[in-house]
Image: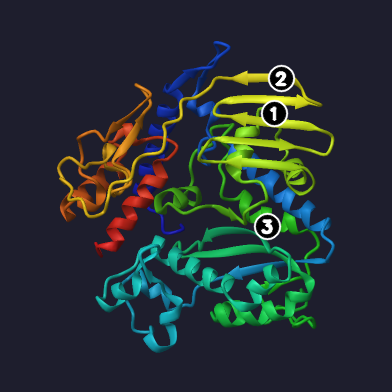
Amino acid sequence: MYGISQNDLEQTTKKLKIQKKYLEDSFFFTKSGQVKTLLEVSFHANHSSRYYAEIINKINTINTIILTEAIEYQPIFLTITLDGFFRGFLKGDFSRYDERKHSHLIPNDEQRGFLRDKIARGERFNIKELYNCLNHQVKRFQQSSPYKNISKSGYKAHYIKVTEPHKKDGVPHMHMMLYIPKIHTELLLEAYIKYFPAPQNLKPLKDKSGLSCKLGQINGFQWEIKSAPAYILKYLFKSFRNVKNNEELDELQSWYVTHRILRVVTSHSLIPAWIYRKVMPLEKDWFYLTDIKRNGICEWSSELDYFILEDENKKVLEYNQGVFKYIVHGKVIKEFGEKKYRPSLVIKLQKTIKRDIKKDVEVQGCFPANEDNRYVFDKDTHKLTEKKKGMIALNYMTNSQLLAYERKLENGLDVKNLSIEYEQRLELLDNEIIKRGL
């Protein structure tokens, strides 16, 4: 089911157990002397219910925000599927692919892979590359004139995007709840038809009696929706396992882990996610923070690890490099945390300076090397140091070293790398492998 074999299921289960054990065994002391594990503060989708709660909070916030807009918003449910010929790509069958008609549907860049070049070489695709094709098509849609005209008119398009696989072979498709000013609906429908031409997307929508809907809706573009949050959440519910009850991984959840595919993606809110997660000890409601952004006073800097949010009633939420403060009318009501050391800006090296590849290495070989990140902040010594000698940076590895390192990570053998950034590191490794056509 979902193209997941028993071996895939066993491997992802093993990987998640190793990750969870690392999070459980890694602990720290708070200023008050409490002992907390990384698992307790994690937002990992596979290990923490906090991530799921955050998504629900954000979805509810989006739906509340559009009700307060001066213009009427229209929720639109989009379904985005790939054309049938993409299924053949998994077996290396490109017989139905016409470069003149279909090349614009397939990315050929560093970010999503040089996939058109891969077709030219006759190399079969994997699930992640089909997912990249879907994202490429969504990006083109969002860069179209009808979509950009929404922001030009002074309003914002909000969206919640959920990816799921087909049961038979695991080929991905997407569902997106899109909120736009109602006056833009007709032009956006035309853009949808242009940028998502798969026949399944464009079939006329039929009612329960089998008759075509008079409103002109199609399978992939529907706007007669009674409860938009519930509509999208039913697709989202399926992709999460019950973390609290330690539910066993099934084929569907394994599909996301195996292919490293995000379950849900939302549009940027007025308040960034990093602030929401930092401010949670003081305030957990994303809508309240959004209201402060609209009607209060806000200031933040991710580089300086600092923010201050003041609402209309002079209540202040402040965070500064590890120290939290809750202030009302100038009086500190609550303060906790401990000042964290922040390294000064790293001096950039001139690009003309020659580098010694053997010395210019990355910690555990996780991030591509460049002239601007020769130094690293050492959490143990709290000092800036040159990067430790060890594995060569990804972009300096030979092909055999790169593939060997991938197998090491996939098998969960590199325990030091099993952290909350684990999937991000695998993404970087994937990009390097795709870049070389491996």
Residue 126, image x and y in percent?
A: 36, 63
Query: How far is mark 2 from mark 3, CA to CA?
Result: 38 Å
**Vertical placement of residue 318 versus 115, above or below:** above
- In the rendered image, which residue does mark 2 sit on? 334
Q: Is residue 80 left or right of residue 282?
A: left
- Give, as a three-letter code, the residue at label 2: Lys
Quick one: SS at disc 3? helix
Determine contact: label 1, label 2, CB under 8 Å. yes
Spot the residue most to the bottom.
100
Task: Find numbered disc 2 in the image and state the secondary structure of the residue it sits on.
Answer: strand
> Image quarter for residue 16?
top left
Q: Which residue is mark 1?
A: 282
Colouring mode (rainbow / by chain / secondary structure / one colour): rainbow
Q: Is residue 220 visible?
A: no
Disc on the earlier residue, 2 or 3: 3
Q: Is residue 164 left or right of residue 19?
A: right
Earlier sequence position, callout 3 versus callout 1: 3
Q: Residue at x 67, y 19 (%)?
A: 335
Question: Which amino acid is tagged 3?
Answer: Ile
Residue 401, image x and y in percent?
18, 49
Q: Is residue 254 left or right of residue 118?
A: right
Between 11 and 411, the one lying in front of the other is 411
Residue 365: horizontal and vertical position, in percent?
26, 42
Q: Real-space Cα distance between discs 3 and 1?
A: 29 Å
Q: Nearer the viewer, residue 109 or 261?
A: 109
For marks 2 and 3, give the one nearer the viewer.
Answer: 2
> Disc 3 designates what residue?
232
Q: Quadrant of the C terminus?
A: bottom left
Tag in front: 3 or 1? 1
Labelled pair 2, 3 in contact (Cβ < 8 Å)? no
Q: Local crowd at mark 2 within 10 Å, few (<14), some, or many (≥20)?
A: few
Q: Amino acid at mark 1?
A: Leu
